[in-house]
Image: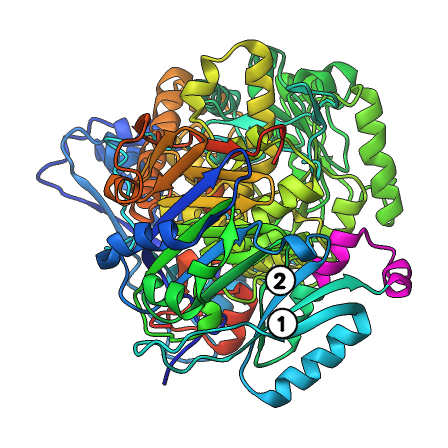
Amino acid sequence: MQFREGQVRIPSGCAISGIMNRKGNLFSGNDIIKSIALMHDRSNGLGGGFAAYGIYPEYADFYAIHMFYESGACRETTETFLNEHFEIEIGGKIPTRKVASVTNAPIIWRYFVQPKPDRLLQSGLEVDEYVAQCVMRINSEYSGAFVVSSGKNMGAFKGVGYPEDMGEFYKLDTYKGYLWTAHGRFPTNTPGWWGGAHPFTLLDWSIVHNGEISSYDANRRYLEMFGYKCSLQTDTEAITYIFDLLLRKHNLPLDVVVTAMAAPFWSAIERMEPEKRELVKSIRTVFGPLLVNGPFSIILGSRKGFVALNDRIKLRALVAAEKGDYVYVASEESAIREVCPQPDKVWAVAGGEPVIAMLEGVDQL
Amino acid sequence: MNIDFRTPEYSIHRDGVRCTNCRICVHQCANEAHIWDEKQKKVLADDIKCVNCHRCVLTCPTRALSIGSYPLEFKPNAHWTPHYITSIFKQASSGAMLLAGMGTDKPYPVYWDHLLINASQVTNPSIDPLREPMELKTFLGRKPDSLKIENGKLTEKMPPQLELETPIMFAAMSFGAISLNAMTSLAIAAEKMGTFYNTGEGGLHSSLYKYGKNTIVQVASGRFGVHTDYLWAGSAIEIKIGQGAKPGIGGHLPGEKVGLDVSLTRMIPEGSDAISPAPHHDIYSIEDLRQLIYSLKEATDYSKPVAVKIAAVHNIAAIASGAARAGADIIVIDGFRGGTGAAPLRTRDNVGIPIELALAAVDSRLRSESIRHQVSLVVAGSIRCSSDVIKAIAIGADACYIGSAALMALGCHMCQKCYTGKCNWGIATQNPNLTKRLDPVAGAERAANLLKAWSHEIKEMLGGMGINALESLRGNRLMLRGIGLTEKELSILGVKHAGE
């Protein structure tokens, strides 16, 4: 019997990579595919995926809902829900290519939508929260349907297979974005479920993640008090919700969020200036349950840029580089040099110290 | 002939070859179990007075003494065990309630022993506490949902917090129930280890005010020793509603233990029984609790967290939720195996529920109501070792109180006769000849050593789980598995069975 994410917790190791152009110039998915393909041996063919930002300029103001359906019937029931809650501007199949190694693909659709004004008003929610709650409802209540991504001018493309095969399958060479992240997965089980692949997303947030966090249940149980449903039981899902809670709901600055998730040690805090010490101490006191413990390296993508972060004692590899307007991060330096042989600067990212890359003119993620 | 039905529980063995008749045992035994026979010029024993506290065994210079069970058997009967038969003898003779000291010794399930801890293998690395930092720092107090930060500065002050270097505190034990030397030992140890001890309901002796920043002062139904300076003296205030060893009834300090010092500290006449009422007479419902919590906060300018201690009883989850909403910053749950200086035996052995189940139920309830983070949870009553602490924290506790274990560090041998005032170890007594046996400096060293040792063990197991800060274990029930538990027990504890 095969278990899926959500029925069982499946630890996995991985490869991650991310490329961004700070000026917002668009480039095709070729580089990110090449970069993640180089780290082929860090995944085992049981999951690969990409997040791309800037790919839907013609529908930039619409929420782009990417969906997996297991059957035509569950597509119909889910579409009824979507029709009730959203004005659908346009919807249809996401174009794919036949790739020999990619089998058992679900029905893959996307819709460009806006919340129905009367429904939104009735809910009393802020518009992003309305969309987020609809996404969580589909994922937890509509069996056989899974929201792959739900942000604006962005999308996630993922499935069961090696990431380079997924890139080909989804024709990512034909898309152009200013920020791409990628993930190759090495799960310790054989779930074979497309929804379980990475990136995991919510609204504009996308996460690719390498690691197995030991704080999972402490994080999850805290998040659930704030209305999140961790239905996939994955670390990536929990990490995405932590960012969403702190950045979007609590509206905290990114450095505070990073301090909460990869907190400095008390011995370092004691050496800080009194004002800073007080602040960091309060962050650890209040957000202790959101400290992400155990090994991880992650890239959080958003419309405005990305942040890459290692756990506080750097138990996972993460390398960053810069060349002109381009910023690169990857599990291995070779994956950067594969697409940028002569970077201006390359460095190993220190534990708990974020690499922040933002679009020009943006100061907060 | 009038027969006293009492028979000895223990038998004192004296090795005739080794015994030199030095009479140290005679002087050491406050129960007068060892007697000097002037005529025979030798030490004899009266087994019936022996409480098996090992004081004589450990002070005998020639190791001539040992204690065993008294070799007396009733006809075997699965229902009428010797305990019930002898209890009836005692009560038929006295017409009184049976008294007991320390926690229940009945073989109820110990859930700690049915929980197993996780460790990392391959997919994530374990962390070595000898080579990497390992953090146990713990904050107790109300936590807001979020922080308000502008330009890198907090714009709203944090509610007051207790800062603990290790998640273990010394439980409430009053001056009166235990000796001043015992209290001083715990106060010094708490200061040394960066944690807290608790005054219990007996007020704060004038010599202990200097340990105020490591003190939690208690306000119980008798209000013994409660005044403004007392409230201000500690770092937190604890309202004691109930106690795990005797839920539903108040404390009882016999007049024999109320000497001059105890009388001054408690603000009661010398020699008078200090009997605290079963309920607080100003708390007959949850809204009254709120008034007391806020009276105490007002009295101390909202500068100290206020804890509410409740005994683990059947409806504990709802009660704890009510206490949180009434404004408690810390909720202390005391399980039914918790110790006491004196309790009616039937109450001690039959009232309340195990702390493991109570904790799991409370933590789950507070989470389902989205208020768990607003209040800290401290558990007491039966914590025996570092792995019990780990398991409690993984179920959902913020910290633990230890009472019995702390006293054992000072020399208590669990003879369960605290209520007699004849504690040979100088702990549960006010007799100056006995209390002087406990040197507070040596006692503090031992109590601090216990915390040090447990903290090392906690770090070792945390690192094994791939965790380097205690907050990542808190409520992390995936780190536990049950063994030999029913579906119902697993569901209440919120853990999977081993192998799942």
Residue marked by disc 2? A229
Q: Is residue B363 above or below residue B186?
A: below
Q: Is residue A118 above or below residue A202?
A: below
Which percent across, then down, holds residue A248? 68, 43
Which percent across, then down, holds residue A300? 50, 45
The secondary structure type at the circle numbered 2 is loop
Mark 1 in CB contact with mark 2 (< 8 angstroms): yes
- Disc number placed over residue B173 in the picture, else none: none
Left or right of B212 on screen, residue B110? left
Judging from the image, mark 1 belongs to the subunit labelled A
Q: CA distance from mark 1 to mark 2?
A: 8 Å
The secondary structure type at the circle numbered 1 is helix
Left or right of B273 on screen, residue A291? left
> Mark 1: which amino acid?
Ser
Answer few, some or many: residues within 10 Å of disc 1's Cα (few below 14, many 20 plus, some between 14 and 19): some
Location of the C terminus of chain A (image quadrant): top right
Q: Name the residue nearer the viewer: B167 or B146.
A: B146
Question: Does A124 lie within the magenta span?
Answer: yes
Q: Name the residue nearer the viewer: A298 or B80.
A: A298
The residue depicted at 32 percent of the width and 70 percent of the height is: A189
Report the coloring of the rendering.
rainbow
Judging from the image, mark 2 belongs to the subunit labelled A
Which percent across, then down, holds residue B383? 45, 47
Magenta stretch bounds: A117-133
Left or right of A42 on screen, residue B384? right
> Mark 2: which amino acid?
Lys
Residue marked by disc 1? A140
